[in-house]
Image (cartoon, helix red, strand yellow):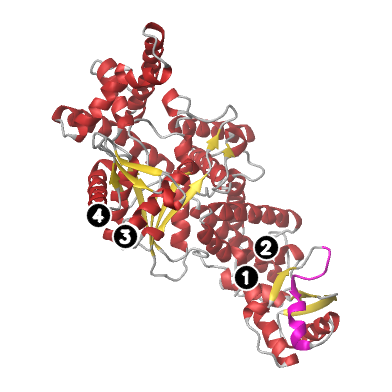
Amino acid sequence: MTIEKMLTEQVLAAVKACYGAELTEKDVQLQETRKEFKGDMTVVVFPILRYSHKRPEETAEELGRYLKEHAEAVKDYEVVKGFLNIEISSVYWMEMLNSVAGNERIGLDAKPTGKTIMIEYSSPNTNKPLHLGHMRTNFLGWSVSQILKANGHRVIMANLVNDRGIHICKSMIAWKRYANGATPESAGVKGDHFVGDYYVRFDREYKAEVKELMEKQGMDEEEAKRKAPILQEAQELLRKWEAGDEETVALWRVMNDWVMKGFEETYKMIGIHFDKIYFESQTYKKGRDIVLKGLADGVLYRKESGSVWADLTGDGLDQKLLLRDDGTSVYMTQDLGTAYDRFKEFDLDEEIYVVGNEQNYHFQVLRLICKKLGFPWADKITHLSYGMIELPEGKMKSREGTVVDADDLIAEMVDTARTMAEELGKLDGYSKEEAEDVYRKVALGALKYFILKVDPKKTMLFNPKESIDFNGNTGPFIQYTYARIRSLMRKTTERNPKVFVLDFHTPLTDKEEDLIRMLGKFADVVREAGEMLSPALVANYAYELAKAFNQFYHDYPILRVEDEKVFLTRMMIAQTCGQVLKNAMELLGIEMPERM
């Protein structure tokens, strides 16, 4: 039981005993006591005055006196105007420590809710490798999935691979024009990088053709962009693909396979997997069928050119294209088909799309069109909109090749972790294999934590060197704190009693009480993170706990303390801090080294 819930129950009992009034939990206002005053929790007395019919100070005094006499958890009290500051007894803190100590799954095993949630994240295009921007959706999607599981929900982690469309055809055309039959194997290049290079090549050649049309044929820029031969080839290739042209489909399959193998390597490296993988090439037809039915039912309309649209002007939006003039599909079409299949297959209570904030309008439209089409699950669609990751030099652009490649970034982070650890001498005596495993864990921990500690809605600036610092609000700082605790636990082995029985009357220091209070809050932090879909709450809690433990460990000895009761209490605090740090970081997808 949290301190807030315990004290609320005691206050309700006190009000009933003192004034004969039956209040509810909503009538009790609690807050943490301000640091300049003595106490742990403060009861705001003003809402109770209508039952006491007395002055605020007199009411607070009567309630405080009752609580001190009848509630074992209340050690003392102090009245400050209309506020009752409560000092919690050591017995309560020891009971709380005893309730959480030894629970390896603390914060991770809420009671099943019976609710099924699908989370779609990653959603890469098969025309380029994963980059830093993809890392935020991958880490965010994974972490939110783990947090919702910890809150008792059934979670299905899904990936929708965007493997069709004009962007895919651009890579295919560039390969046909310039590759001379080369493959990832013959070029010695990872498959997703290989195909991505041709996507960048397409953009370069396209710009050159546009410039030439403008200079030699006098076209304006818009006309030149439409009539550039390489773009028209890509558009024709898309029509052939949707028509099932065998040669086009065969090349598409080969190039997609190259990319998917590359993706799988990267996913394995960063510790990401999925329960279900959807492919746009398999869902867009369902979406087209839904659109055509909506057209037949009069919900949608067709323009003279042949394209099909949804009129959303009556809802304060605009008109939304669903099928082009030539009958080919757009992103919205396949999202309609995918959503329909998912809700039909899994009877979802909610579907969460982890997608950047540049798609806010897209998901607003998706929900609205689904509602107009009469789908009862339209309001169960949630867009977890996250801010972009920017670099000191600005935004990344895939088609211009100015992105930070995920594989290169991870390799760079591992090298940085290796260099820093060697300079600090932290892994002296480790075998090469042990050291490399720690470098990997620290590098990925630094990357994941740096991204996840920021509120998902905020745009963030990525700084690799800052992320891997062993001090401050970083993943390596928390990992090092955990390793420090594990080292301490190994050193206490000989002194550990066979039976861990706390003496609840052992006196506690302020820092010990603060740590126990933080440990007791972890489950609430996980619950709130699930409600807010924000791993940042868990990340920053872990940092605050690690910082508080290090301050405590600096000020108070554990191995050298002679009093066995104090030793056992401090050892259990340290052990539980380590377990909670490990569990918190597990929710972020971060591994914790046992030694550093």
Are circles 2 and 1 on residues that touch, CB within 8 Å? no
Disc 3 is placed on an element classified as: loop
Q: Are marks 3 and 2 in contact (CB under 8 Å)?
A: no
Q: Quick check: 482 left or right of 547?
A: left
Question: Where does the image place residue 129, in percent across and percent down from the top left?
Answer: 38, 32
Residue, disc 2: 515
Q: Which residues are magenta?
A: 36-52
- Mark 3 or mark 2, earlier in chain: 3
Q: Report, in whole angstroms, how far the alpha carbon at label 2 lies from the one at label 4.
A: 62 Å
Identity, as a three-letter code, of the amino acid under mark 3: Gly
For label 4, the SS is loop
The crowd level at tag 2 (other Cα within 10 Å; few <14, some 14-19, many 20+) is many
Q: Which of disc 1 and disc 3 is earlier in sequence?
A: 1
Return the residue at label 3: 374
Within 10 Å of disc 3 (Cα), the crowding (few <14, some 14-19, many 20+) is few
User: Which residue is identified by label 1?
Assistant: 97
Q: Earlier in the sequence, mark 1 or mark 4?
A: 1
Q: Does residue 564 belong to the magenta stretch?
A: no
Q: Residue at x 58, y 73 (%)?
A: 99
Circle 4 packing at 10 Å, graded few (<14), some (14-19), many (20+), is: few
Find residue 153 and report its horizontal and vertical position in percent: 41, 64
Foreground tag (2 vs 4)? 4
Q: Secondary structure at mark 1?
A: helix
Residue placed under numbered mark 4 in the picture: 297
Q: Is residue 420 visible?
A: yes
Crowd tier of the residue under label 1, counting other residues whose Cα lies within 10 Å: few below 14, some 14–19, many 20 or above: many
User: What kind of residue is marked 2?
Assistant: Leu
> In the displayed structure, would residue 401 be above or below residue 507?
above
Q: Residue at x 56, y 73 (%)?
A: 499
Residue 590 seen anywhere in this rendered image of the structure: no
Nearer to the camera, 141 or 209: 209
User: Image quadrant of residue 83?
Assistant: bottom right
